[in-house]
């Protein structure tokens, strides 16, 4: 596996000049001590920083930050890998299982406990499927002589 240009950079004799005293921007500032531009690799995308290092042939003043764990130079597009997320995986699986269980329980309740069908009672001779018969008259009052 070949190494990338940024992985092999070493600064053998660091310049004593203060970055904050130099004029320029976050990417490049002019050093009045060595009369060169100092390039901040950590404020560039990795491909741009690599191109700059390769094109300079080693005759370059740079400033950069390194990742303490890996030793790699940090650039703008540096994104550390998330830590092992065993808890997140367990929580996600538990959430999916709970959602399926709740959904399954709801479906089972709907199937097993169907409400009793309701009957529509219609007074009189009007109703769906009812025969049209006249309602008989009440019997005469026989107790009246």
Image (cartoon, rainbow, N blue to C red):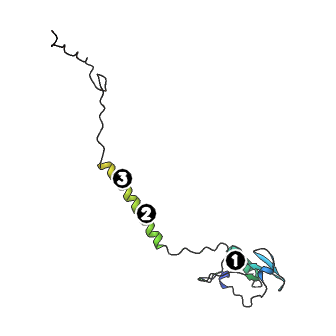
Crowding at label 2, few (<14), some or many (≥20) Cα neighbours within 10 Å?
Answer: few
| Image quadrant where residue 44 sits | bottom right
Q: Residue at x 31, y 23 (%)?
A: 126
**Residue 36: % across, % down:** 82, 82
Distance between the alpha carbons at the discs numbered 2 and 3: 16 Å
- The residue beneath circle 2 is 95
Vertical position of residue 97 compared to residue 57: above or below:
above
Q: Which residue is drawn at 29% across and 48% down?
A: 113
| Image quadrant where residue 5 sits | bottom right
**What is the residue that sits farthest to the top in this orientation?**
145
Of the two numbered discs 2 and 3 on the same chain, state the one appearing first in sequence: 2
**Residue 48: % across, % down:** 71, 74
- In depth, the one of 139 and 14 nearer the eye is 139
- The residue beneath circle 3 is 106
Q: What element carries label 3?
A: helix
- The residue beneath circle 1 is 42
């Amino acid at each position: 596996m070949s190494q990338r240009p940024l992985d092999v950079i070493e600064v053998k004799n660091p310049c004593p000049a203060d970055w904050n005293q130099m004029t320029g921007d976050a990417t490049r500032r002019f050093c009045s001590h060595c009369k060169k531009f100092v390039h901040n690799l950590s404020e560039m995308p990795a491909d741009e920083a690599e191109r700059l290092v390769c094109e300079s042939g080693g005759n370059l003043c740079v400033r950069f930050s390194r990742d303490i764990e890996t030793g790699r130079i940090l650039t703008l597009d540096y994104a550390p890998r998330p830590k092992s997320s065993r808890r997140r995986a367990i929580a996600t699986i538990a959430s999916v299982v709970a959602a399926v269980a709740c959904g399954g329980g709801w479906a089972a309740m709907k199937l097993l406990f169907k409400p009793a069908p309701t009957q529509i009672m219609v007074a009189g001779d009007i109703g769906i499927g009812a025969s049209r018969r006249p309602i008989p008259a009440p019997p005469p009052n026989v107790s009246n002589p």
